Amino acid sequence: MRPEESIQLITGQGYWTPLLWMAAALGTLLLAFLFWSRGRRGYKRGTEQDLPFVSGEKVENPRLAATHLYWGFAEALRPVLRRLGAWHSGVVNDYAAWFVVILAVIFLLIMV
C-alpha cells in the first residue's frame, strides 16, 4: 500500500480525507473570527444598550414572554395548533419516537 492511500478513504458514497476536513473546519473558524473581530466595539454594560429591543419597539417592561413575541403566528395558526395539541403528551419518549419515525420516512423518500 502506498503512503498516500493510507490517509484517504474512497467509498462508493464519497471521499474522505481527514486533513482536508480539518482545513475546512479551520477555515470556517477563521472566517467566523474575522466576522467577530469586525464587530462594533461601542457596547457598554449597564447602559440603555442592555434594554430589550423587540420587533423595532423599545420595551418598557423587560419581562417579555415568548408568547408575546409569537402572538401573531399563534393567532393565525390557532386551528392547526389545536389539532396538534391533541398529540401533545408531554412525554419525551413519545417525541423521540415521532422523531425516529419521521426521520425514517425522510430517509425512505431520499433513497427512492
Image (cartoon, grey):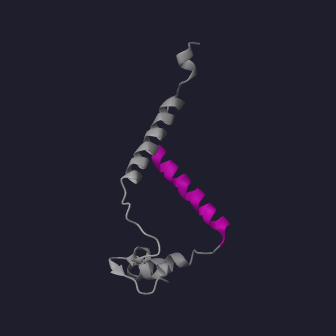
Quarter where residue 44 is shown? bottom left
Residue stretch rendered in magenta on the structure: 91-112
Q: Is residue 68 above or below residue 17?
A: below
Q: In the image shown, does 70 or 93 lie closer to the viewer?
A: 70
Instruction: Work out whether residue 69 or residue 49 is closer to the camera in this orientation and state it.
Output: 49
Residue furthest out toward the left: 56
Q: At which x and y percent is residue 88?
A: 58, 75
Q: Nearer the viewer, residue 49 or 18?
A: 49
Q: Is residue 69 magenta?
A: no
Query: In the rendered image, which quarter is residue 40 located in?
Result: bottom left
Residue sticking out furthest to the top:
2
- Locate the N terminus and report the quarter of the image it occupies: top right
Residue 87 in percent (x, y) is at 57, 74
Q: Is residue 94 magenta?
A: yes
**Looking at the picture, does residue 56 appear above or below residue 35?**
below
Task: Give how far across and how far down residue 17 sits, in percent.
Answer: 51, 29
Magenta span: predominant SS is helix
Residue 98: in sight, yes or no? yes
Marks counted in the figure total 0
66 in relation to 7, above or below: below
Say whether residue 11 is left or right of residue 37.
right
Is residue 14 visible to the viewer in this orientation of the structure?
no
Q: Position of residue 49 (x, y in %)?
A: 40, 74
